[in-house]
Amino acid sequence: MLLFQKPKRLKTIAKSASLCALLSIILGSCLLFLHVSPRAHLSAPEPSIFFRDRHGRFLGEVSNPTTGELGYWPVDALPERVVAATLAAEDRGFNEHPGIDPRAIARAVWHNLQNRKRQSGASTIAMQVARMQNPGARTYTRKLAEAGTALLLTRRYGRERVLRHYLTLAPYGNRIHGIGYAARRYLDKPVDDLSWAEIAFLASIPKSPATMNPYLPAGRARAKKRALWILARLREQQTLSSVEYRAAADELRDLQVMLPVNRPLDSIHALIRLREASTKDRPPVPLVNTTLDLELQSEVAWIVFKSLKQWENQGARNAAVIVVDPGSREVLAWVGSRDYFDGAHAGSIDYTNVPRSPGSALKPFFYALALERGILRADTVLDDLERGAGGITNADDRFLGPMLPRAALANSRNVPAANLLDRMGVEAGYEFLRQVGLHDNREPARRYGLGLAIGGLPVTLEQLVHAYTVLAGEGLYGGLIWYREQPRPEPRRLLSEEAVRQINLYLSDPMARLPSFARMGSMEYPFPVAVKTGTSSRFRDAWAVAYSNRALVGVWVGDPDFQPMNRLSGFNSAAEIAKAVLTFLHRDQLSGMDNWSFPPPRGYQSVRLCALSGRLATPVCEHVSLEWFAEGDEPAQVCSAHVQLAVDSRTGRPAQLDTPPASIEVRTFLDLPPRYAEWMVSQGLALPPLQATAVSPVPADIRLHITSPGQGLRLLRDPETPADQETIALKVVADPSVPQVLWYVDGEAFQVADYPYTARWPVQPGEHVFQAQVPLTDVRSGTVRVVVE
């Protein structure tokens, strides 16, 4: 009985073994599927960015932030030549197998067994993609996982997408991944422009990127040898004809690669700024054609270096320059410091983004806004007298009297600017500065007050240049442009073209800058340029913004530690750099023969005005200004401030009928409103004789107004100042003028003061009352109370 049962039992055992094997295969397949399924997706690191200047020259590159590698540029289309060479080199059966090649696997196993070591891997392109996405040690277990992943990848995405992904991830040595980046870095070409020889050369590298390094002669020779083998395969497959093969082989023999190009050292701050811009608003393509001009960048850096060498003994330790195209707002050059690696002067800091006091550089925006709102006209007379609103005075302690807006702005006078801002309203001025990007409204306007007119609001050079694009760009405000592919929203209009053109005419007029800024200096050019400088307190910062029809240049010069410089102002430092940059950009116009200028407002007519009265000039007006007005809006009144009288040269009084003809002289006198009396005397300007004589009749409607001291003034005595030197000025305006006034202090007569009625009172502790009176009349001023502590 047992003899007959034994064969049956053996069959049962055999069936059980087969079933177990089948179950093991199924279970193993399930486990493999569960293991590889999460990996079976196509993913690539974020592409690195390759920056070129506006002429295609290498500027720099930003590696992948995670891997630190370069490339990973996506391949949107598959050029036939690239496909043919890649498949010939890596996976000849790509179009037939499902992601793994059984014949290649069998061949690899046989070779490995024969040689008792791993010589052939049989990896398909899909398997290589699986490995590149999940790198690790090369074991048979991982090989099995890669095979499973390759099958799923091919099934899920199709062969074409897998191949495109391979060409995105494949290593080409020197941290470079992807054929797109390799073609650009080694051959300076897009993939579509590669020849057969160049494609075969690149296709050879992924086999062993370390030993086929194109930058090394030995590695380049190995790559060429393998590339020739790839070309031979393509000929065998009849992809190449014999003629094409020989031509490609000849080209391959002489093929050269671009040697590694270091980023320009004088462009590091620009590259960092570009990286920040690309992180915030990532370019649509990884090959970024920036707006920077490397030739200009190098020239500007050299100008900065030379200039700082010249001024180093005066405390100028660093500088920054930005150059922008005024029409497109494209950034042409960006020098953040004298030298990024200069540790002694904190060169790694980008001073284009360090907030500093701009001095007078913000004044044009207040003038422009006042013109825009009708608060200011070209014939408005602004007073440059004593202290202005808020106690603000001029940096040079000089006063130029009555001034038209053109001269007041061109001379950068503090008093008229402060008075104008006070008249316009600090809140309105502060809000306009926000609109042009000079602050973000974090602080209230009252924190800065009228100090806004003289640099109380810290700004960066980038903010200042961006704001000035409104003046250089016909009143339009838009973002700075860093690269060609950058979105360019429609700019907003902040100022009318008429207001901006008036400001440009003021800032480009060298005659209007007199007497504050000498002719033929750093602010005068042989071609039209609008210039504004600024100098902060104690010469800590020097600024200049200059713009022509070709470029807008912004410059900052100073000390990184906010130390004062030795009388280096915007005029004699920053403006010198700006002029050197613009002269380089306009080197074809240095003859001064081109009759170009900033255009006046459209439809405006030119009118000759007296520079002191703002009225139509007469032949006796010594200083005349050419101003522009809309048709029908021209001033109609003729200047009456300049008076010509026949004078007896012996007495200086008006000539009489009996005055000998030889003693009669016709002289020109200045008859300005009474508030200019003290200024006229300080300038040696004579009143008409009838007003200057002490026997002139006293008008009945005289008005007296004390201008100094101010009402409610509280003074604190300085114990270190000698008592006889502690005085305060007593000043009054008489309208119309009179020969004398009598000053009263605490109800008692203090001093009779001749025209222009100024006196000084020795300071005494306590509360005091001041009043002025026209002698021998009942005409008195109001009282002013002062407390001395």
Image (spheres, rainbow, N blue to C red):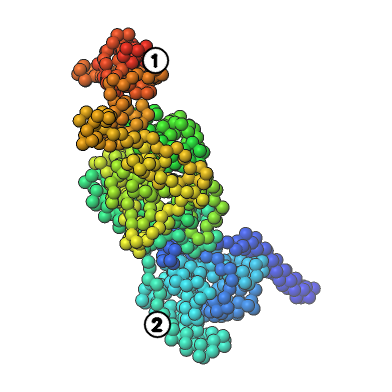
Quarter placement of the N terminus: bottom right
On the picture, is 524 further left or further right than 116? left
Q: Quadrant of residue 672?
A: top left
What is the quadrant of residue 34 in the picture?
bottom right
Residue 618 pos. (x, y %) = 38, 41
Question: SS of the residue at dot 1?
Answer: loop
Please tell me which residue is depicted at 24% across the width and 41% down the height of the picture: 566
Q: Position of residue 533 (x, y in %)?
A: 35, 45
**Numbered circle sitting on residue 254:** 2
> Quick check: can you spot residue 707?
no
Residue type pointed to by label 1? Gly
In terms of secondary structure, where does tag 2 sit? Answer: loop
Which residue type carries mark 2?
A: Asp
Q: Is residue 764 above or below residue 64?
A: above
| Residue projecting furthest to the top | 747
Q: Is residue 671 left or right of residue 602?
A: left
| Residue at position x 59%, y 66% in the image | 145
Foreground of the two, 411 or 559: 411
Asked if 321 appears above or below 250 in the picture, the reply is above
Q: Position of residue 241 (x, y in %)?
A: 54, 89
